[in-house]
Image (cartoon, rainbow, N blue to C red):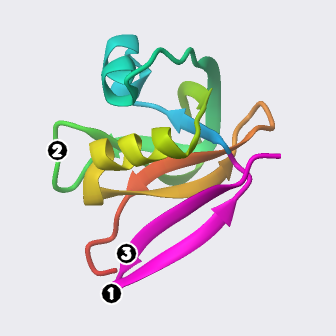
Amino acid sequence: MIWICVCYVRAGYLILKMTDTPFIFAYGTLMDDSVRTSVLGKEITGKNDSLSNFRLKKHSVLTSYPVVEKDEGNNVKGIVFEVDNNDLINLDRYESNYYRREIVTLDSGVKSMVYIENDPKG
């Protein structure tokens, strides 16, 4: 089992969470092999998967980029790939503070992290 430290700042405090979910579900720019390789500094191959009861929409601030939100009955197609702590650091830097990670269960049954819109109100 791999344990990954999930860190984020909320209301000025550093929050640490341990997770045994070393997977990321990508539905936007990270589905592109060249973007993913550039962000991670290495090639990682993803597998097709989907996320039920979510839908794609435009990010409220970064309107050129997508975000997923819960929406019963809809489905988002994407890819899932395995990550390590260094990958998460690079992904968090790429996604910036406009996104945060949430743990979901994909249609394949894989538990994965997915980037969703970060609530600017904290």
Q: What kind of residue is marked 3?
A: Val
Marks 2 and 1, how far apart in space? 25 Å
Examine the image and state in which quarter residue 28 appears. top left
Q: Is residue 52 visible?
A: yes
Residue shown at the point (33%, 87%) measured from the top left: 11
Q: Is residue 75 visible?
A: no
Tell me which secondary structure the magenta stretch mostly adopts: strand
Residue ID for mark 2: 63
Marks 3 and 1, how far apart in space? 7 Å
Which one is in front, 28 or 101?
101
Report the side of 33 relative to 111 (left or right): left
Residue ID for mark 3: 9
Span of residues in magenta: 1-21
Q: Secondary structure at mark 1?
A: loop
Q: What kind of residue is marked 1?
A: Ala
Q: Mark 1 packing: few (<14 Cα in 10 Å), some, or many (20+)?
A: few
